């Protein structure tokens, strides 16, 4: 029973929960960026490059071997999927830039918080009492 309670304590620790939330949000953000690159960025680039779809760019290393009688593929083709790699690099650059911007904003907020002047400390009780006595004496005098 000790192992289960140790695991529960570990899993419920704040950092672990924050990390889990970050991973889920990161995965969702990755899907958004992938769609953004594939559906928004790449079509105009494809038009600019004469209708080339980057995901179709491949460097064949070996052609597929097809049985002429049955028309079945005996050995699959081997190719370097350069276009898929280009899309992945673009995805990475967008995600890296987005993370950079979030960190930059957080650092600016932290810096502004540090630059705020600290509220002056309340004077010690003795000083407050002395000032009150002074004011009372002035009022009587």
Image (cartoon, helix red, strand yellow):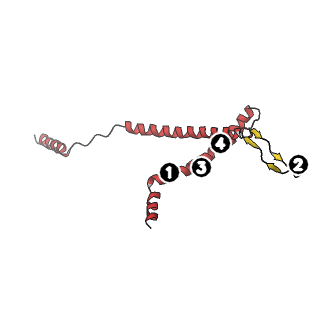
Q: Between tags 4 and 1, which lies in front? A: 1
Q: Mark 1 falls on what kind of element?
A: helix
User: Sequence-wise, which precedes: disc 3 or disc 4?
Assistant: 3
CA distance for labels 3 and 4: 12 Å
Q: Earlier in the sequence, mark 1 or mark 3?
A: 1
Taking 56 as reference, is 28 above or below it? below
Which residue sits furthest bottom? 1
Q: CA distance from mark 1 to mark 3?
A: 14 Å
In front: label 2 or label 1: 2
Residue at which label 1 appears: 19
Mark 2 → mark 1, Cα distance in angstroms: 55 Å
Task: Check the image and report above or below for 60 versus 12.
Answer: above
Q: Check disc 2 and report its element: helix, strand or loop.
A: loop
Closer to the eye: label 3 or 2: 2
Q: Which residue is mark 3?
A: 28
Nearer to us in this view, 125 or 4: 4
Q: Secondary structure at mark 4?
A: helix
User: Mark 3 and 2 residues: CB-CB less than 8 Å, in contact?
Assistant: no
Please name the residue shown 54% across and 50% down the image.
Answer: 23
Label 4: which residue?
Answer: 36
Where 6 falls versus 117 (above or below)?
Answer: below
- Identify the mark nearer the N-term, 4 or 1: 1
Look at 73% across and 31% down and name the residue there. 48
Query: How many marks can you see?
Result: 4
């Amino acid at each position: 029973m000790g192992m289960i309670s140790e695991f529960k304590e570990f899993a419920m620790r704040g950092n672990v929960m924050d990390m889990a939330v970050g991973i889920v949000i990161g995965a969702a953000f990755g899907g958004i960026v992938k769609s953004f690159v594939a559906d928004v960025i790449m079509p105009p680039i494809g038009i600019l490059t004469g209708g080339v779809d980057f995901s179709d760019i491949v460097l064949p290393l070996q052609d597929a071997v097809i049985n002429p009688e049955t028309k079945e593929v005996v050995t699959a083709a081997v190719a370097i999927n350069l276009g898929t790699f280009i899309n992945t690099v673009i995805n990475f650059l967008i995600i890296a830039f987005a993370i950079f911007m979030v960190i930059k904003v957080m650092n600016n907020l932290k810096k502004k918080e540090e630059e705020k002047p600290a509220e002056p400390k309340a004077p010690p009780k003795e000083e407050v009492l002395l000032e009150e006595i002074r004011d009372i004496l002035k009022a009587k005098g």
